[in-house]
Image (cartoon, rainbow, N blue to C red):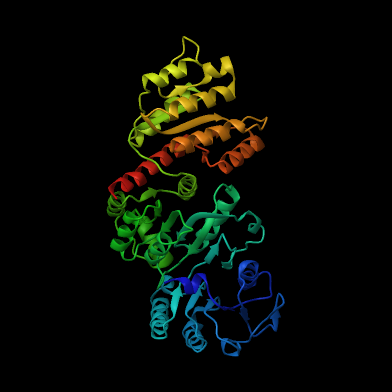
Amino acid sequence: MLEEFFNPNGVAIIGASGDASRGGYYLVKNALVGYRGKLFPVNPKYDEIMGVTCYPDVRSIPENFDMAVYFIPAKFLPETIRECSRKGVKAIIIESAGFSETGREGKALQEESLALARRYGIRLWGPNCMGYLDGHSLVAFSFMHLDEWTPYIRPGNVSFIVQSGMLSAGFLIMVLGRGGMGIRRACSIGNKCDVNETELLEYFVNDEHTGVIGCYLESIIDGKRFLDLAAGTDKPVVVLKSGRSDIGARAVLSHTASLSGSGAVYEGAFRQAGIVQVFDLHELMDLARGFSMTGSFTPAAGTAVMTFSGGAAIVTADLLADKGLTLTGFSPETIESLKKIFPAWAETANPLDLWPAVEALGFQPVYIAATEAILSDPAVDSAIIELFARPEGDYGYMEIISGLAKKYAKPVAVWAIGIGSALDRFTSATERLGLPVFAEIRRCADFIAGVRTHYHKMKKH
């Protein structure tokens, strides 16, 4: 159980600070935004921080509490665990570095601390991590500087498990800055001396508020259990696994002291478990965002492409082929429907270049009619729609297209090009309607391939 971390009754922040240049300052400030329980800053230099009574040490706290956040030098952790045990503490998030990632002495300190924690029945999260953020409650037990990002945090169904500390901070800021995706929880687990990705995966599999699980992992503890959980859940599991190369594996060892393992072995295991594997952070973010907007899907046919450009059609066809995806042939009924909006001389094959019809009848009516015809076709199970983000800002047609995607329960990926604010407005409006917008055609193909990977797994259940 991880409830002692996510729903603690009382929290001590050991290493709290009143100095805005210190991470301990943000630990307190972030906690005060969303946490509604009792907060106990600990630092002998202060009597109060941000209006909250500050205590010189753990022993001075006048009542018991469930969790501590540790942010002082590593060497004091064993004694802190002993003091916390006397206060009924059940969980400690260790955000300090200086443990197994630093070598033999740091590893010995980490092992000593874990042994003590187990003796006292205390769970450890980290060390060398950034804690976590809850997008629903806005609780953040982390020293990230979240001031300017807090207004952009919105609740959603995507939970992240990120092994790296600072990468999780940068990743979260990237997610919030890009928009379009709500967060359930984002968890940074660092060296994972106790709480690990497999335990968190199980927690999120069973969490009713999590619909998509994204992971950045350098190693996997209890790999069989991890794979079994991923294979057995209806929720998409998207994983960026680093350390696939020999050079990367050596870097992983120096970063969090994790043993990475063979990239080829992981790729094969992920494929069998129905895990959607990605290869960079933007892809992890994009596919998690896409899955968060995608409902049920039956991968029984092929993909259709609607575009404004013959060149883009060819590029898309090549990228889909690279992913082993099929461009389906349209049914006679669909072709007849399309002929009603196209000039007699124009082709109505897949991929479908809509420009001749757009020139004749206009942009919005053509895109709506073509989407209706194509998504209603039993030979089509998914679609990529490519278009201009038009500067006039009338997105009623996208609301209709989104409604058609929901009506026919078929995933639709949108690739849009446009200038500056027009593209930003289009992207925001379209994603509010529930359609993912991607900046690259390649990512549309990646997303459709990822959806197929996940739902082929679902067919096995």
Q: In the image, 300: left or right of 47?
A: left
Q: Is residue 82 visible?
A: yes
Q: In the image, 140: left or right of 119?
A: right
Q: Quadrant of the N terminus?
A: bottom left
Task: Identify the residue at horizontal 51%, vertical 88% (top origin).
Answer: 83
Image height of 461 relative to 345, above or below: below
* Nearest to the observer: residue 37 or residue 288: 37
Please state the horizontal and vertical placement of residue 275, each as a whole percent of the image: 35, 51
Please state the horizontal and vertical placement of residue 16, each as a whole percent of the image: 62, 77
Q: Is residue 308 visible?
A: no
The image quarter in which residue 420 lies:
top right
Image height of 65 relative to 376, above or below: below
Image height of 116 relative to 187, above or below: below
* Nearest to the observer: residue 321 or residue 88: 88
Task: Identify the residue at horizontal 38%, vertical 63% (top origin).
Answer: 202
Task: Identify the residue at horizontal 46%, vertical 15% (top origin).
Answer: 339
Please state the horizontal and vertical placement of residue 9, each as a whole percent of the image: 55, 77
User: Which residue is most to the front?
Assistant: 407
Q: In the image, 151: left or right of 273?
A: right
